[in-house]
Amino acid sequence: MDKRTFLKLTTAMLATPLETRGGSEKPDAKLTNWAGNYQYSTDKLALARSVEEVQGLVKKLAKVRVLGTRHCFNGIADSKANLISVEPMDRVIGLDPKARRITVEAGVRYGQLCPYLQGKGFALHNLASLPHISIAGACATATHGSGVKNGNLATAASGIELVTASGDVLELSRDKDGKVFPGAIVNLGALGVMTRITLDLLPTFEMRQDVYENLPLAQLQDHFDDIMSAGYSVSLFTDWQQKRVNEVWLKRRIEKGVTLDAKKEFYGAKLATKNLHPIAELSAENCTEQMGVPGPWYERLPHFRIGFTPSSGKELQSEFFVPLKSAVEAILAIERLQDKVSPHLMISELRTIAADENWMSTCYKQASLAIHFTWKPDWDSVRKVLPLIEKELAPFKVRPHWGKLFSVAPAILQERYEKLADFKRLLKDHDPQGKFRNDFLDTNLYG
């Protein structure tokens, strides 16, 4: 499929109002993920509305996995036996203004929580590009936003409640269970069914977003650190052609008493004169406000507006994490593959993420550059390109995103996580029979 044909298909599904799905939802005849590229191996999906219902289901079922908002592109959430969804569990349990913490049920999505927090005068430290994902699922897979000083979304979590394989409720917190909590938060769905999560908060803040076009690739070689630290959150979008970054999305906090403006030029890139989509040919209708217009944090940190989302996301995604110190080398390595990559690509995004201490996080003990690929929905072509990318990034001990498409061999993947043995022991303590294991985990963690 050429780019023009693909864009025609994508435009047809651009802006569909977000709906909050509740307990009355009936399972689809054939369960697929958000993008439609992955069909789950069973249609046995139970909707749980309370912790007690989760406990009852877990006790009854011999094998089970938890299905979130279905934004993963691989089989990490799949099960051949049974699936549980906690989407109906979407209440705020409690807000502690003094401690700056909030506890919510595991079915809450960022798009639901953020306006509530704004109304109470609080904010989260970061958000992913899409606000429509569940908080529990994002934390369990180390999903991230951007910013050299900002950890991924799991780093905001200070407590979790899970139903373990025995049906018991397990509560863990960063404060009381410091030795174990870093292994439990990015749990890949293998530790149990997350039913509640507590998040650290910040006082609310405003931001502006300015977009620049056509940043020369050579500027990244000379000024990478300055470019990526020029805002609270910075994203670079490129199709790896013409030795340039197509768009720079610069998101900056607005501080009291400090005047921010947008220079006409940013390291050789030109200030955009209208709102842009990451794929320039597409309408920016469902993108967050740009052009320096001030707005609350949750309407600027994501790339796409909360009220609208692509209805099915006809695309494939891969993402690879390399140490930030090797960022420029890694970018140039991919740029050398442009003839192999670009024909199958919609767009790539480059983002930075701070290091963290969570055992199975893609940023465990290393500040990272995330190299993201949004592919055309052609798996036969993409599966041939992935090994080429992974080979180029192998010298940097690349870690793929847990919920996206990759082909890294299990033995190599396991070597990338020095706390994997501890993580497996944690799983054995709470799930000795492997009730929550599936083919994805058996292959990538135990294969």
Image (cartoon, rainbow, N blue to C red):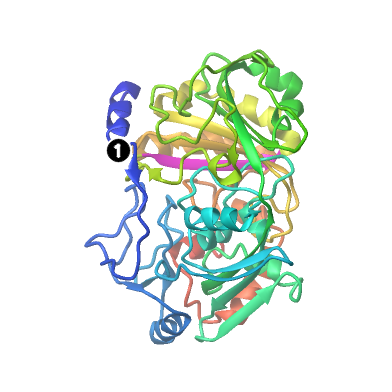
Give the side of residue 21 with respect to residue 340, left or right: left
Q: Quadrant of the N terminus?
A: top left
From what the image shows, is residue 231 above or below residue 44? above
Foreground residue, 144 or 433? 144
Secondary structure of the residue carrying tag 1 is loop
Residue 37, image x, y percentages:
34, 47
Foreground residue, 398 or 236? 236
Foreground residue, 144 or 1? 144
- Whether residue 447 appears in this view of the structure is no
Q: Which residue is mark 1?
A: 13
Residue 243, image x, y percentages:
58, 15
Q: Quadrant of residue 251?
A: top right
Give the side of residue 64 with respect to residue 200, left or right: left
The residue positioned 29% from the left and 71% from the top of the image is 44
From what the image shows, is residue 196 above or below residue 117? below
Q: Of helix, strand and loop, which mostly describes the magenta segment?
A: strand
The residue positioned 42% from the left and 35% from the top of the image is 375
- Whether residue 94 appears in this view of the structure is yes
Q: Residues within 10 Å of mark 1 (few under 14, many from 20)?
A: some
In magenta segment, residue 85: no
From what the image shows, is residue 434 above or below residue 246? below
Residue 70, image x, y percentages:
40, 56
Q: Quadrant of residue 302?
A: top right
- Residue sitting farthest toward the left: 29
Foreground residue, 363 or 252? 252
What's the amino acid at mark 1?
Met
Disc tally is: 1
The residue positioned 51% from the left and 31% from the top of the image is 348
Residue 311, image x, y percentages:
32, 45
Give the side of residue 58 with respect to residue 148, left or right: left
Q: Which residues are magenta?
A: 315-323
